Image: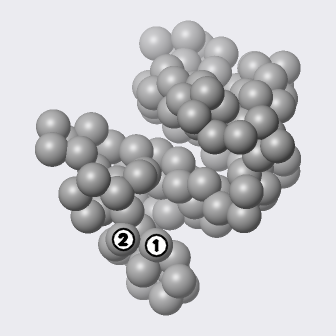
Amino acid sequence: MAANTSKTARASVKAGQKAGAAGGLNVLGEFKYLIPLNNGKHVYLRNLVNGKTLHLATGSEAFTEAVKALAAAGHGAKIKAEIEGLAAKLPADQGWDTTLKTLEEANAFAAEAVAA
């Protein structure tokens, strides 16, 4: 874990890694990129490329750019699938469908095709 992360961020990531916890690692080793916070307004975004966990507002340009960077590294399809799962599983007022639409309009997942 990066030394510059907050105590809250480290505790949240650690809690998410426990078996069976939402947003954590499962027994097959699949990595979750998103830890939803504040009813979908914010998210911890895990970056496998640099090992950092970012705390971002889901409607921010920084979130879009972070997703674009991960998509360029080949992680776009998994992030998109996670957001689709959150949209299906969580209440509509959390806005994951809007977040997905915003990312698609910004071509956040198209970076994966360019990188390939």
Classed neighbour count for the residue bearing mark 2: other residues with Cα under 10 Å, few (<14), some (14–19), many (≥20): some
- Camera-side residue: 89 or 104? 89
Mark 2 touches mark 1? (CB < 8 Å): yes
Q: Quadrant of the N terminus?
A: bottom left
Can residue 83 be seen here? The reply is no
The image quadrant that residue 91 belongs to is top right
**Residue 37: image location, x then y, percent:** 65, 62
* Labelled disc at residue 12: 1
Which residue is under mark 2? 15
- Camera-side residue: 93 or 71? 93
Look at 41% across and 52% down and name the residue there.
22
**Residue 110: image location, x then y, percent:** 65, 16
Rounded to the nearest angstrom, the CA distance separating label 2 from label 1 is 5 Å
On screen, 52 above or below 59? below
Report whether 69 appears left or right of 58. Answer: left
The residue most toward the bottom is 7
